[in-house]
Amino acid sequence: MVKATIKLIIVSRVIAIMNQKGGVGKTTTTINLGHALALAGKRVTVLDMDPQGHVAVAYGLDERKAGLDKVLLDSLAIDDVTIAARDNLDVVLAGESLIDYETIAEGGASRGHKLRLAIENSKLKERDFVLIDCPPATGLLAVNAMFAADEVMIPVSSDYLSLQGLSKMVHILKRVEVLSGRSIKLWLVSTRMNLHRRLAHEVRRRVLKYFPGRVFKTVIRENVALAEAPGFGKTIFDYKQNCAGSKDYQALAQDLLLGRIA
């Protein structure tokens, strides 16, 4: 009797976390959501596409090490620059030369697909989640992230300028969908939420109104510990496990896993 062999095919969820407006908690969300998913038993890799290299700092890693700069500029394999950061959590750093990719002129349209191809030819497809921390801009690095991602998560802080940034991001995302010939799932998360401010609730109300079915249930509250933790090379779970910030990012991870929306 011949036994049938069943091969389990793992499909990673590749999520670009981005907003062209700075100060909305983009990197904070990437590093802490990544760790929260890892603590929930998921295998996660965080890619730092922001030349500022803050992911390395937040995880307590050496930001001078090679990373996506070598992948994009020198065609090095992602697997060769992947670093284990926590249990179930790997990181690919930005690298000191990543900003140089923004000025690449040769290669035409293929320049925007370099990251996607690198992911497809790596072991990242065996991970449960790949989170991409994107720069606060819409240049070539951000375009690479969008072409590589199946989903985009936009952190929206509780101010009106953040709403303007959201509007521009959605417009850019639609253009990328047309160019790539595929749809990209959009998620929104309320960040830096001061529950005592009327403006914060008004901004969230507007986001819920204009993006029904796309806003996660959990809001990330303004929390001093979230700002302090990277200074010690720690995520919120390393720094203060029982604070509001850790509880919020644990809840956000469950929103993502279970599809919980507001």
Image (cartoon, rainbow, N blue to C red):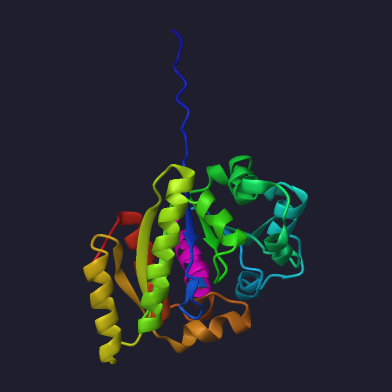
Q: Is residue 247 visible?
A: no
**Depth check: 237 or 158 in front?**
158
Q: What is the magenta range?
A: 27-41
Q: Quadrant of residue 83?
A: bottom right
**Depth check: 126 or 86 in front?**
126
Point 62% across, 47% down: residue: 109
Q: Is residue 249 above or below residue 229?
A: above
Asked if the magenta segment contains residue 33, the reply would be: yes
Instruction: Tell me if 57 is positioned left or right of 66 in this view.
Output: left
Task: Provide residue 67's location: percent of width, then percent of height.
Answer: 71, 59
Point 70% across, 47% down: residue: 107
Task: Provide residue 131's location: percent of width, then percent of height.
Answer: 51, 58
Q: Quadrant of residue 144?
A: bottom right
Task: Provide residue 156's location: percent of width, then percent of height.
Answer: 38, 74
Residue, far top:
1
Point 47% across, 34% down: residue: 9
